[in-house]
Amino acid sequence: MTITLAAVNGPEFHPAALLALILFTVASLGLGAAANVVSRKGLFLRNYYLGNRSLGPLAIALTAAVMSGGTFMGFPSLVYSFGWVVSLWICSYMVFGLTVLGVLGKRVGQLARRTGAITLPDLLRERYSSPLLGILSGLVAMSFLTCFLIPQFKAGALIVKLVLPDAAWSWAAGWLPPGIDPAYLVGLVVFTLTVVAYTTYGGFLAAVWTDIFQSVVMAIGVLILLPLALIKAGGLAAGTLAGIAQTDLGFAFGPGANRPFLPITLAISMFFLWAITGMAQPSTVVRLMAFRDSRVLRHSIVWLTFYNLIVYVPIILTFIAARAVLPGLSIEESDEVMPRMVLELVNPYLAGLILAAPYGAVMSTVSAFLLIVSSGLVRDVYQRFLHPTASERLIARLSYVTTMLVGLGVALAALRPPHYLQVVVMFAAAGLGAAFFTPLLLGAFWRRANGWGALAGMITGVGVTIGLYVIGLITGDPDSPPPYGTGTWPWPFFLLGFDPCVWGLSSSLLAGIVVSLATSKPDPAKVALLFDRMPSNAPAPASLDLHPELAATLLHENPSGDTSAPTQPRSP
């Protein structure tokens, strides 16, 4: 089925909105340039990809916040389309800080420092002493993150499209192939050049600094838009009644307008998808490898919970009211409901600032994911296997080029994007969670976990998740209504009514435990380095392969070699 982006007529252009968005973009580029200057101090790789492990509480909280193109484009589209039940769909974000930062945060930080890991594949390779696991985890992360990036590029392009004058894109209408909206194409080019430029030049610090700046703008934007939407709609009751009139009673009472969007089994699934798989998302794990100390982590949990509360609740209320303000938007147009509401309700001079909220969310997500994919190629493939002795200068140049090429490649893939942004986000999140949850959880807390168990968990989880989507593709009928969910074809096979993420996580965890118990125990000396209290000059586990005499020293200090002894982890 060919998916095209319909060219729809947006609100009237006003130069003030475009000017505000330009100023926001210039500020982001300036932060990228400043980050490049700061990151020149010290080792390039650790600075470019981890910011020298120096992030404070606000930086960790705001960069770990689950804001993306899905938050400000896809999520409002779902609220507008299906009604109040979508609040239950997203409610687990209120405990996101506790699960994501509280469960794995401290241990991931400890493991990253003890192993010297810079990337997630680095961390898994050293924890399990498995080069094969490192290669596979890098390939899995790059594959799913590329899927994640496509809807983000679409969201950024849609926002730019709606603030550009007709003259900015009308020249391209005559030579483009059918199915490509010229306004969307110009928006995609502008967005791509901006985000790729500051990410490539500034690296991790640029992504973090712009995340903080953009996160503040996001919160301000949604808090301004909420009262304006309620006033224009005549209140939440008016918005709800308008939604019922345009759809049915399911808009107000669930499980969804027109059809069952969220039955109880899928509501349970969404808790696993957001609150549990979030612990294993590569973009989050990288932040957990970069915090300054444990005190920072504790404060970050509070800040992140508060931030999600003041962003997601106003979004739900605003786009319930949108049914009365912008009635009758089509499926294609519903992905644009956020910028359309802004341009409909707000003075043009303020509209650009509020539009910077979704634009900033998209930019921050793209910058983080571009760096993860780039680091996978440069650190985990090129330096690890092709050129281990590469100089800092060569690695720096290769990192810049790789980040730029990955961004341009994803932009090409985004020329024909999906209708519902949130569908691709859910697929990628489920796949990444199924791949990395078990290796990270068992690796952080279970001394008996080994490389074979981690491999089995990763392969099983990814296989089950993709398999359920493939079964849905084969058995589903694009011309008939979906059983439930967002309803974009192809939809997965909901085994017993649960989303594939539940089966991916559970099968991965089971396989990881069973295979670890069925195979040999990990090296006691390497396990001791990661679980027991060690002197500050203790070697990284990988160094035991090069200097086996160190293992005898470690076992002499821990004569029992008991890998099941209580741990005494050292705070980062």
Image (cartoon, grey):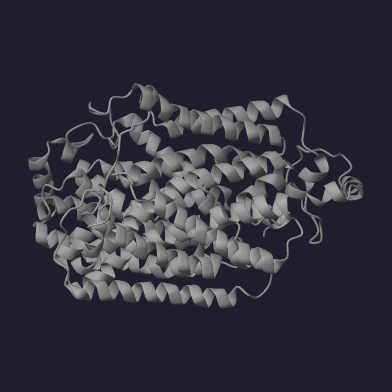
Query: Can you see residue 387?
Result: yes
- The residue at 39%/31% (across/down) is 499
> In x, y percent, where is residue 411?
41, 55
Location of residue 382 in the rendering, given as x and y in whole percent from the top left corner: 67, 53
Q: Is residue 479 above or below residue 89?
A: above
Location of residue 398 (image quadrant): bottom right
Q: Nearer the viewer, residue 548 or 166?
A: 166
Front in this rendered view, residue 192 or 247 = 192
Q: How many marks?
A: 0
Locate the C terminus and report the quarter of the image it occupies.
bottom right
Name the residue at 34% across, 53% down.
Answer: 154
Residue 323 higher or lower than 221, as above or below: above
The percent position of residue 565, horizontal first and vertical second, equals 77, 40
Q: Nearer the viewer, residue 376 or 539?
A: 376
User: Would residue 37 appear left or right of 552 to someone viewing this image?
Assistant: left
Instruction: Judge from the rendering whether residue 407 lies leftward or rightward of residue 175; answer left or right.
Output: right
Q: Quadrant of the N terminus?
A: top left
**Residue displayed at 65% across by 43% down:** 135
| Quarter of the image where one finds residue 363 | bottom left
Left-right relation of 366 to 221: right
Above or below, 50 relative to 546: below
Tell me which corner region of the image, top left, top right, bottom left or bottom right, holds residue 184. bottom left
State whether residue 291 appears in this view. Answer: no
